[in-house]
Image: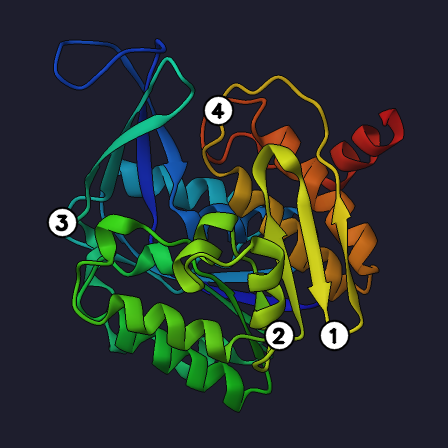
């Protein structure tokens, strides 16, 4: 059983209950929903049967316990998630525009997630680590870059490899060093899980397929390109293929890309072919968007089997 270790943030989301609702007038919000891109990823990988652990910080509050309870229930090793006293767990508020887009307000700057330090990256967490998974969206705290580099060094010392989702957030690129760090981690990754928007940042003006192939100029063994409603594409040095999406009614797209990426990685590490891993990843992403809440649409293998049989 492959071991995947994630490093990043946990938070909860409070979600607007009506499309078109904004932040500038009173409205109803539902939650808390367990969230955090690395948490969504590692939860889904655990559901797929991988041995998983997450290194993070959460507030010593019920919001933090809400996330930890979910991760623990799905088999994630949460022993490396530190509870920070007197500091709140991060919160994201989400509104849905009439055109299907989303607006966010994050309360993360002084939240527990930003208290992750080098001391939290213990060598014991990487015993038997096959893959370290990190994401560009976690670069909201000053020390996170150093934390990621230390985690990668310990992973490589254990014989493991890096899985990196650039997950570029424009608001984080203004922080000194973040853009360079995303490029550095992209260049050091063995598995890359970008979106088309990530490729537009990494290779401005280049067609997505050409940009994905450029990523193979480095140590990357493969690229799993997430294309949302258009499905996904896979690239390695032997060629490429496109995998169509599943037609579903979208309720909430939050977390679907993290869910798809985790399914792809878990299946690939399990020994499935890239085609099978991509097909199951697309099914997981499709199921994810049919349920409200960033982690509520995470799925089990039997659910994916049923969806694939139905298509």
Q: Which residue is labeled 2 in the image? A: 216
Name the quadrant of the N terminus. Answer: bottom right
- For marks 2 and 1, the one nearer the N-term is 2
> Measured from the top left, where is residue 280 in percent x and y?
75, 44
- Label 1 Cα crowd, 10 Å radius (few <14 / some 14-19 / many 20+): few
> Measured from the top left, where is residue 121 in percent x and y?
35, 75
Residue 299 seen anywhere in this rendered image of the structure:
no
Residue at x-position 48% and y-position 24%: 252
Please state which of the two labelled residues, at mark 4 or mark 1, is closer to the viewer: 1
Q: Which residue is labeled 4 in the image? A: 252
Q: Is residue 88 left or right of residue 301?
A: left
Q: Which label number is shown at residue 131? A: none
> Measured from the top left, where is residue 282 in percent x and y?
69, 40
Kind of element beneath mark 2: loop
Kindly indicate the quadrant of the structure image that contains residue 173: bottom left
Kindly report the distance in space between the C-alpha atoms of the residues bearing marks 2 and 4. 32 Å
Q: Which label number is shown at residue 237? A: 1
Q: Which residue is labeled 3 in the image? A: 87
Kind of element beneath mark 3: loop
Residue at x-position 22% and y-position 16%: 22
Kindly indicate the quadrant of the structure image that contains residue 265: bottom right
- For marks 4 and 1, the one nearer the N-term is 1
Kindly report the distance in space between the C-alpha atoms of the residues bearing marks 1 and 3. 47 Å
Contact flag, marks 3 and 4 (Cβ < 8 Å): no
Task: Name the one closer to the observer, 135 or 42.
Answer: 135
- For marks 2 and 4, the one nearer the N-term is 2
Please state which of the two labelled residues, at mark 1 or mark 3, is closer to the viewer: 1
Residue at x-position 15% and y-position 9%: 26
- For marks 2 and 3, the one nearer the N-term is 3
């Amino acid at each position: 059983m492959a071991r995947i270790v994630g490093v990043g943030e946990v938070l909860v989301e409070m979600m607007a209950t009506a499309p078109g609702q904004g932040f500038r007038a009173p409205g109803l919000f539902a939650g808390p929903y367990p969230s955090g891109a690395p948490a969504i990823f590692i939860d889904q990988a655990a559901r797929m049967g991988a041995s998983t652990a997450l290194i993070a910080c959460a507030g010593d509050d019920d919001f933090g316990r809400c996330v930890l309870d979910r991760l623990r229930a799905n088999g994630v090793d949460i022993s490396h998630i530190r509870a920070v006293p007197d500091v709140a767990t991060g919160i994201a508020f989400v509104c849905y525009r009439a055109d299907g887009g989303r607006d966010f307000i994050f309360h993360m700057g002084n939240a527990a997630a930003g208290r992750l330090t080098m001391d939290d990256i213990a060598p014991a967490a990487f015993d038997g680590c096959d893959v370290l998974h990190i994401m560009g969206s976690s670069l909201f705290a000053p020390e996170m870059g150093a934390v990621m580099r230390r985690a990668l060094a310990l992973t490589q010392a254990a014989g493991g490899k890096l899985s990196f989702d650039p997950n570029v957030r424009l608001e984080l690129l203004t922080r000194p060093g973040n853009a360079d760090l995303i490029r550095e981690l992209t260049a050091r990754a063995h598995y890359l899980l970008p979106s088309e928007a990530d490729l537009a940042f990494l290779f401005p003006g280049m067609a997505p397929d050409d940009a994905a192939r450029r990523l193979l100029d480095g140590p990357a063994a493969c690229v799993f390109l997430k294309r949302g409603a258009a499905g996904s594409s896979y690239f390695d040095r032997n060629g490429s293929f496109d995998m169509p999406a599943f037609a579903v009614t979208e309720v909430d797209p939050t977390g679907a890309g993290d869910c798809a990426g985790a399914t792809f990685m878990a299946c690939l590490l399990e020994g499935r072919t890239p085609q099978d891993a991509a097909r199951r990843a697309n099914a997981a992403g499709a199921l994810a968007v049919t349920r409200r809440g960033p982690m509520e649409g995470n799925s089990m293998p039997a659910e994916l089997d049923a969806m694939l049989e139905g298509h």
